[in-house]
Image: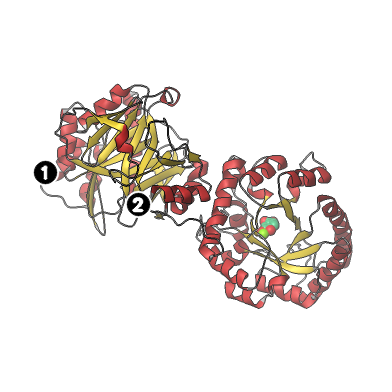
Amino acid sequence: MRTSIATVSLSGSLTEKLTAASRAGFDGVEIFENDLLASPLSPEEVRARCADLGLSIDLYQPMRDIEAVPAEEFARNLRRARHKFELMRRLGADTVLVCSSVHPLAVDDDSLAARHLSQLADLAQESGVRVAYEALAWGRHVNTYTHAWSIVEAADHPALGTCLDSFHILSRGSDPKGVADIPGEKIFFLQLADAPLLAMDVLQWSRHYRCFPGQGGFDVAGLVRQVLRTGYDGPLSLEVFNDVFRQAEAGPTAVDAHRSLLVLQETVGVAAPPAPVVPTGVAFAELVTPDAEPVAAVLGALGFSRTARHRSKPVDLWQQGEARILVNTSGAARRTGTGLAAIGLESPDPAGAARRAEALLAPVLPRRRAAEDAPLDAVAAPDGTALFFCATDRPELPNWRADFADVAGESGGAGVHRIDHLALTQPWHHYDEATLFHRSVLGLHAQESVDVADPYGLMRSRAVTNADGSIRIALGGGAAPTDDTVHAQHIALATDDVVAAARRFRQAGGRLLPIPANYYDDLAARHEFAVGELETYRELGILYDRDAHGEFRHCYTLTVGRVFFELVQRDGYRGYGAQNAPVRLAAQHTARAVIGG
Ligand SMILES: O=C(O)c1ccc(O)c(O)c1
Ligand SMILES: [Mg+2]
């Protein structure tokens, strides 16, 4: 289906918005009046720019407070409409949106509203324009889509139809089944937005918290299915008023937006991109660092051994059980410092996973970093992390491991057997985008988002997982001023005995994050522990949580650059310790103040 986006959904000048929409693959735009008024381009220039960019102008919007107003008011409205229809002729736009009136003098009189809209439609028709009447959820007298449709039906004018907007319908809890009563050709336009389920005034909710389909709590797909059954063949158009998107860069937002429509079309069965290939585990995590020594010291103390070296690049493989960490000292990190740059995802079908990712607009990275390397499909996540689709030691497929030559690593270890989860800090304005990306591109399941108090702001966190929990990525982000050293990425390592692993780490010279004594007093109040157990946790800085499925014990290393490690002992527990994150964040701020990072 054709896809469109309202300019109000993107940041920047009109030109920037149009360019971003075009690059992201949209077919058309809704031009929001304020964007045109503020643009130095003439309507003819806007029209030409859209044509150059391959965009149609699918809607001009909005006209307000038109119907069911006193006669002199309505006369002024018709005068205004004449001007706007002339403007639309210059723009080459043939459909105008009219929102249901919020005018204080508007009367509750459907037949007057129908007469007014019919008169407006007469005028529109003379200019070759169609009028799409939309019920605002906070309209003074008309605030449901069924009511707006009954007025359009009564007016019975060929140039008058209705505009359905998923936000106005779903925010009020209206039943979308009523859409079946509207003939498809009378649905002149379909606007789509999702929103988080918030208990607040509907106007504020609409103007500040809309998001792209799949990022909120509405059943947008259910509504779209209803609309498609009517035979509607206009565009799927996003109209998202959102404070974050207003500030974020238009290019990535437009890609995120278009991805949401691709996924929506897949959900309702009108598009079939390559099927998701759900990853089955973590093949490796790759750190970049300008200086391998501090990272090597921490990995060594954690029980890792350097087991192999890349044949052509300064990349070492550190391994313990099935946990593999690549340490890359090539140039890039000199600018960025030590950080988590890439994740290898074990994939049942790496090429298929890459095709899915590409179809959903993930930037594809070069398959071979050097001529002699095994070809490896990779894409960039919204935060820039490279995701490699790997087949480790499967003879029929290229093996990244074959690029590495074994070196004599000392054995031993600290009982770490695999990577339990990875935590990626998202730039604050990419949090919803990151969730949709990981869900749709990788086929992971998103858990509930939780608020996490940081001493200097509020973070949000949510895990995306596969069915058996062998992939668990915690996405963190939020309004807190991000401090790279505290809001760092982290790699959580699974062990069956966190106390033993923590002790070994310390004995080997590693430094664990100190946790305040008050935390343990609170633990003692909340849970019963065996004699001496809590004292051990207190001594080592081990945190504790439990859920309906089991227990979780975990502790943290100090941060190296922008990354730190966590040792976790997971006994049935299904979360990732988010309950303890406020204490961890505060402790990290303290540690940084005391130790200086
Ligand atoms: O918030 C508004 O005013 C507004 C304007 C136009 C729309 O299509 C809409 O859904 C809301
Ligand atoms: Mg709307």
Q: CA distance from mark 1 to mark 2?
A: 45 Å
Kindly report which numbered mark, 1 or 2, lies closer to the viewer in this rendering: 2
Q: Quadrant of the C terminus?
A: top left
Q: Which residue is mark 2?
A: 348
* Amino acid type shown at disc 2: Pro
**How far across and down, in percent of the image, does residue 178 sit?**
62, 76
Kindly tell me whether residue 237 is visible in this rendering. Answer: yes
Residue 434 versus residue 487: which sits nearer the camera? 434
Q: Quadrant of ligand 2?
A: bottom right
Q: Quadrant of residue 268?
A: bottom right
Q: Which residue is mark 1?
A: 532
**How far across and down, in percent of the image, does residue 531 sit?**
10, 47
Counting residues from the start of the chain, the first of labels 1 and 2 encountered is 2
**How far across and down, in percent of the image, does residue 171 sit?**
57, 64
How many C-alpha atoms fall within 10 Å of the one at disc 1: few (<14), some, or many (≥20)? Answer: few
In the figure, is residue 167 to the left or right of 68? left
Colouring: secondary structure
Kindly tell me whether residue 539 is visible in this rendering. Answer: no
Which residue corresponds to the image point at 75% horizontal and 69% vertical from the top-left?
A: 161
113 over 428 or under it: above or below: below
